[in-house]
Each structure stands twice: as structure tokens, then as C-alpha cells.
Amino acid sequence: MSRTRTAVLAALALVAGVSGPAVAVTPSSAAAIAAIPCTVDYKIQNDWGAGFTAAVTVTNNSAAKSSWAVKWSYAGNQKVTSYWNSRITQSGTAVTAANETYNGTLATGGSVSFGFNGSYSGTNALPTAFTLDGVTCNVDDGSGGGGGGDNGGGSGTRVDNPYSGAKVYVNPEWSAKAAAETGGSRISSQPTGVWLDRIAAIAGVNGGMGLRAHLDAALAQKGSGEEVVQLVVYDLPGRDCAALASNGELGPTEIDKYKTQFIDPIATILADPKYASLRIVTTIEIDSLPNLVTNTGSRATATANCNTMLANGNYVKGVGYALAKLGAIPNVYNYLDAGHHGWIGWDDNFAPSATLFKQAATSEGATVDDVAGFITNTANYSALKENNFTINDTVNGTSVRQSKWVDWNRYVDELSFAQAFRTQLVSVGFNSGIGMLIDTSRNGWGGSARPAGPGATTSVDTYVDGGRYDRRIHVGNWCNQSGAGLGERPQASPATGIDAYVWMKPPGESDGSSTAIPNDEGKGFDQMCDPTYTGNARNGNSMSGALPNAPLSGHWFSAQFQQLMQNAYPPLS
């Protein structure tokens, strides 16, 4: 008995678990097919309980191609063991089938077929989503003129990777600030996150855009295609217990206020049918749960505030409630903050963090199905990829892990960390289809200080320090870092397991003020934002590396914006 998964628009067919004739294309359905950039017909021709044979046919409805790659992910433990008419690679549950030298040409309207054998135990579930060269194959691209009404076009169908085949919302408020800067027009059309960092932000602060205004603007930008809107949901009780610059408005015990006055109103707006065609990505509570792992108990880095939040459970409860309420909305994709490699990349932080995230994701009515993925490096500076050294290098018999910079961490950059942490998260019970986001808004580290090659092999420290792109004094430094630059531009599906590189932190918005500034936003003065501060246990008692004359967190910082453009990598044209 054969089983088939045909990735076409829902109005045509989604055939699974049955055998039978192919779907006939009538004149009335031809226009709908033309609006679908590609279709994938995945058939299991033979299944003998421990293994199977599959046949795949890909049809390209977009521009002609000279090469192609089809990707999908398995929900179970299926493994490709042999293949033909394509070159198949597999990393975990993610599979990529690329053309052979003789079948790379794929004309508009043309098809190509390939097959493979695989093994499995348990259930051999059919893949639910496919991409062709990064474009989702079961999504209407809008060229057929479908949709209409207040919610625009597009399919509104839930997909594996919301960024695939979609535009991403450009915040007009941030864009205007960027464009007003000398040279800022080079990046002012880039998509950035919209921060909901206090209750008042839902309606709009100081005459600025509120949540509905942003969603309405996203619909206008969307047109008839697909559009992602990126929101940062960020107002936990006792927020940022190990810092002061980003303290929030709610006290440690105000969990009910968080639920009823912050999360519930956001959920009500996002659930409005008017916005059903948008793909709404929510980044849930940055810099919260990792604090419960690294800054509690008897550790030198512990704070009284973090111990309070661990004891009262309100970080876990708040995150669980947010995931449950927002995850119940079909077009919302929750990405939970996962710190960065310089925070939880050490052995004693790595696995415990994944376990804690699972606890939060199964509390207050939430389940792992409410988590589309995780985001790393939000508002931070960790380099995406260090090319001049690896964690496995040694210098004169001494491991790179023993260098002062790496300090026994298992990871030297965000990409390797995000991919490894994804595997760890799946191992503790998160769905195998989760994807990772990496914030690359400020981790380019270009400019004249960017090393052109490895450091000298005089010692392990000269080797690492001479070759590392990340020019911070210490990996624990996080506030308005001197020398930083824009990183990779936002893009979908850039690497295995990575749903997108994003600019969730809008470049040019301060991390915190260099000196104490009275305010009504609940934001304190953190010495890590003072360039004269000599440090604490969390940054190895190093200088803060912060830029001078910075405003309150979230406020526009022109000098930082200019530095980010100057040191961009890849460089700005």
C-alpha cells in the first residue's frame, strides 16, 4: 500500500495515508496551481515495518533553475540509507535532496523525480512541509490574486518555517530613524523586531504606534503574499533579575497583572481574524529563564533578585502562560529565548537550561506544541561564526578551551551553539521540527579591527585573541559594546536547523544608559553600561567595554548606530 503527501494548496488536496489516482487539474484549479511556487509529491511505495522506499516528484512553478535542493524534516527517527537521482544528506531529522550533475535543470512547470530507501522504528509519519531552494512548496505566493478583504492574500496556512517564502515586516518607526542618519538609508528597509516591553506599549507610547497599528501596517506591506511580523514579548515580573538597565515595570510577585494586563490583551489582538493571514513570530521573554540557571544558588554570579524569581516560580509561570495563550492562535509562532553561547554554552549550564525550558513550556497549560523554536543572541554580540579557530584546536598541546577567552566553553560562536542546542532541546522532549533563530543585528565585528587570519601560535591566548572576530573584552559584556558592527542581513533558512537570521534587536536602540537617568519606564542604571566600570564576577572582573554617552535602554543612540554601520560585516555597499 502506498502513502502520499502532496504539498499543494489546501483547496486542492493534502493526501495522506491513502492510495489512488493523482489529483486532476481542471481549468478552474490551474490558476491556483500557478500561484503555488512549487509542489512536492512524496510517496511511500513500500513499507516493511523497519524500513521503506520513497519516491519524490518535485514540480517547479517559478523561474527556471539550473540547480535545485529540496528540504524536509521528519517527525520521527527516519534515516535515509540509500538514494538515486539525487544526492541526499541528513542532519538529525532534517533532510536535503540536491540535484545530480545530470538533472539540475528544472524548467518553469517542469518536474524532477528521485527516490530513496530509509529505516525507522515506531511510526513512519509523512513529512508535512517541503521547501524548494528555501521556498515553501505548499504556500500560495499571491500571484494568483487570491485572498482579499482586510487580511490581504496569502494562504494563512501554518508552515514549518514562517520565514520561508515570506517578506518580513519593516517597522516604519525604526525605519524613519535609521533613514534620518547619514548613510542609514542603506539598511532602513531591513526588518526588525517590535518590542512590547511594557503594558503601555500595547496601545502605543508617547504617540507612537501600538500593536494594532503595527499589524495594520504589516497588512499594508504584505499585499497578496506572505508576511512575517516579529514581536518581542518582554514584561515578566521581576524582569532581568541580573541586570538593572532593562528592569521592567512589574514587581517579582505581580504574575497576575502580567497575565491579565499584558499577555491577555496581546492575545486578544493577535487572535483578531483581521490578522489571520499574517505569520506572527513572538520572541518570548529574553534574558529570563537562563538567569534561573546561571545566576542563582551559591554561584558567584548569583543575585538576590534571581534567587527570588527562582523561588517564587514566576518566570516559569509567566513564560508558560504566554506560550499557552499565544500558542493557541493558529498563525502565531512562539520562539523562546535561549540566551547565547557565552551564557549557557558551558557544560553546567547547557543541559540544565534545556531542562528548565521544557519545564516552562509544559507549565500553565502550555505544551511543547506551543513552541515553534528558540532564538539565540537576542540583543547580544556573540559572533555568528568564528572562522580562525575551532573548539577542537590545540596550541602547543593546549586546548583552545583553556584559553582565557573561551574559558572551557564548548562553543566559540552562535551558529555551532544554536545547532547543538537545538539537538539538546529535541532530546529533552521538544518537537523535532523546531527551528532556531539567531539575532545577527550587532554581531558582525567588521571594520579595521577584524582579524584576517588566525592569531600567533605563541600561546593558546595569542592564537585565540589574535584570530577572534568578537572583539569584546569579555564574552559576558553586553551593554552598547565598543567596536561592534551589523552582522548578516536577515534571511530565511541560512543553515541547517536555523529558520532565519533576524534583527530582533533594532540596531541603534541603546542597551542602557551610561549614567543614571531619572525615568518613568522602570529602567535602572546598570554599571555594565558605564565605560569606566571595572566589572564583576559575571564578566570576569573586566572593563565593561561600553560606549559613552548612551541614553536609556530602547532609546535611539546615534553614535552606536553609526558605529554598527561602519563595522558591518558583511560590509555595507
Image (cartoon, grey):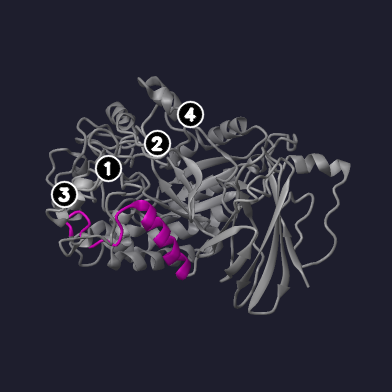
Rate crowding at label 1 as few (under 14), some (14 to 19) or many (20 or more) other CA atoms within 10 Å: many
Estimate the x, y position of residue 459 in percent, counting from the top left. Answer: 13, 55
Secondary structure type for disc 2: loop
Q: Which residue is mark 4?
A: 189
| CA distance separating discs 1 and 4 | 28 Å
Residue type highlighted by circle 3: Ala
Which residue shows up at 64% across the image and 74% down it? 123
Q: Which residue is mark 1?
A: 245
Query: Is the N terminus in the top left, top right, bottom left or bottom right quadrant?
Result: bottom right
> Would you say the residues marked 1 and 2 are in contact, meaning their CB atoms lie under 8 Å apart?
no
Estimate the x, y position of residue 385 in percent, counting from the top left. Answer: 35, 49
Residue 422: quadrant of the picture: bottom left
Q: Which residue is mark 2?
A: 506
Secondary structure type for disc 1: loop
Q: Which residue is mark 3?
A: 456
Q: Earlier in the sequence, mark 3 or mark 1?
A: 1
Rate crowding at label 4 as few (under 14), some (14 to 19) or many (20 or more) other CA atoms within 10 Å: some
Q: Earlier in the sequence, mark 2 or mark 3?
A: 3
Q: For marks 1 and 2, give the one nearer the viewer.
A: 2
Residue 338 shown left or right of residue 534 in the figure: right
Rate crowding at label 3 as few (under 14), some (14 to 19) or many (20 or more) other CA atoms within 10 Å: some
Query: Is the C terminus in the top left, top right, bottom left or bottom right quadrant?
Result: top left
Q: Is residue 445 visible?
A: yes
* Furthest residue toward front: 102
Q: Earlier in the sequence, mark 1 or mark 4?
A: 4
Q: Is residue 338 visible?
A: no
Secondary structure type for disc 3: loop
Which residue shows up at 68% across the image and 66% down it? 54
Q: Earlier in the sequence, mark 2 or mark 4?
A: 4
> Would you say the residues marked 2 and 3 are in contact, meaning their CB atoms lie under 8 Å apart?
no
> Would you say the residues marked 2 and 4 are in contact, meaning their CB atoms lie under 8 Å apart?
no
Q: For marks 4 and 3, give the one nearer the viewer.
A: 3
